[in-house]
Amino acid sequence: MSARERILARIGKSLSGSTPAEIDAYLAAHPRGPAPTQLDNLVAHFKERAMQLSSDIIEIADRTTIPAHLARYLAERSLPPRGVCWPAFASLPWGAANLEIAARPANSQDLVGITGAFCAIAETGTLMTLSGPETPPSNSLLPETHIAIMETRRIIGSMEDAWDLLRDEYTVPPRAVNFISGPSRTADIEQTVTLGAHGPYRVLVFLVSG
């Protein structure tokens, strides 16, 4: 038996016979550990931490202005004016900004991927996304440029708050939960930080307050 099998066997044995109500009661009886300091301004703190992680931030009040802002962003970086988006953003006026945006999951040929996020974590500058038919994770993982559309009302304080929000809003958890903290990076080679090693080279977050 492998180490993995032994660990899972011990977990299964400890849960044997437990009902969902008993498991919920056990979790309720074990409160959180030490919590981080309460943040006064979640939006400002998220912006600061996200920018420290090399994310770009654009604040807007009206999401219909996103295509025009994105067109300028892509042009300034000599990036192609085309990409893919989650279905929720298909109705934005992409064509008016001379952008070609298809509402579908990304493939290896797509260079720009547009997504939303379940929430954002101010403490770490992290986006939390959930997988699903309408929220394909490939749009944030495969393209070299990831564009995230985030409503400021969905910015919460800590990682613990994010999991609490997920439990409150989802009876059944999604198949995958992804945490995105700026562009992909690694320092495996000679301890030199390299962006885009395992995912996007750049991340742009639109913070929508309206």
Image (cartoon, helix red, strand yellow):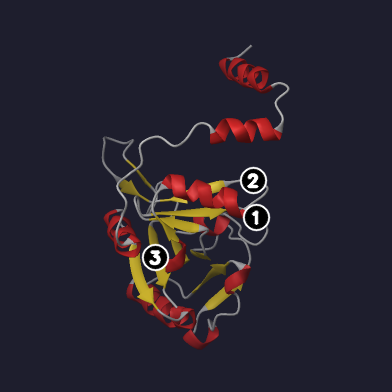
Q: Residue 133, percent across and down?
A: 68, 58
Q: Residue 154, percent across and down?
A: 47, 62
Q: Residues within 10 Å of mark 1 (few under 14, many from 20)?
A: few
Q: Is mark 3 on a helix, strand or loop?
A: strand
For the residues labelled 3 and 1, the Cα–Cα distance comes to: 22 Å
Regarding residue 198, the answer to whether it shows in the image is: no
Look at mark 3 in the image and give the residue it sits on.
204
Look at mark 1 in the image and give the residue it sits on.
132
Q: Residue at x 39, y 77 (%)?
A: 60
Q: Residues within 10 Å of mark 3 (few under 14, many from 20)?
A: many
For marks 3 and 2 on the same chain, the one whose residue lies earlier in the sequence: 2
Q: Residue 204, percent across and down?
A: 39, 65
Q: Residue 175 carries which label?
A: 2
Q: Nearer the viewer, residue 129 or 198?
A: 129
Residue mark closest to the camera, 3 vs 2: 2
Q: Which residue lies furthest to the bottom in this view?
A: 96
Q: Which residue is drawn at 42% across and 67% down?
A: 152
Residue type, mark 3 in image: Leu
For the residues labelled 3 and 2, the Cα–Cα distance comes to: 25 Å
- The image quarter containing residue 14 is top right
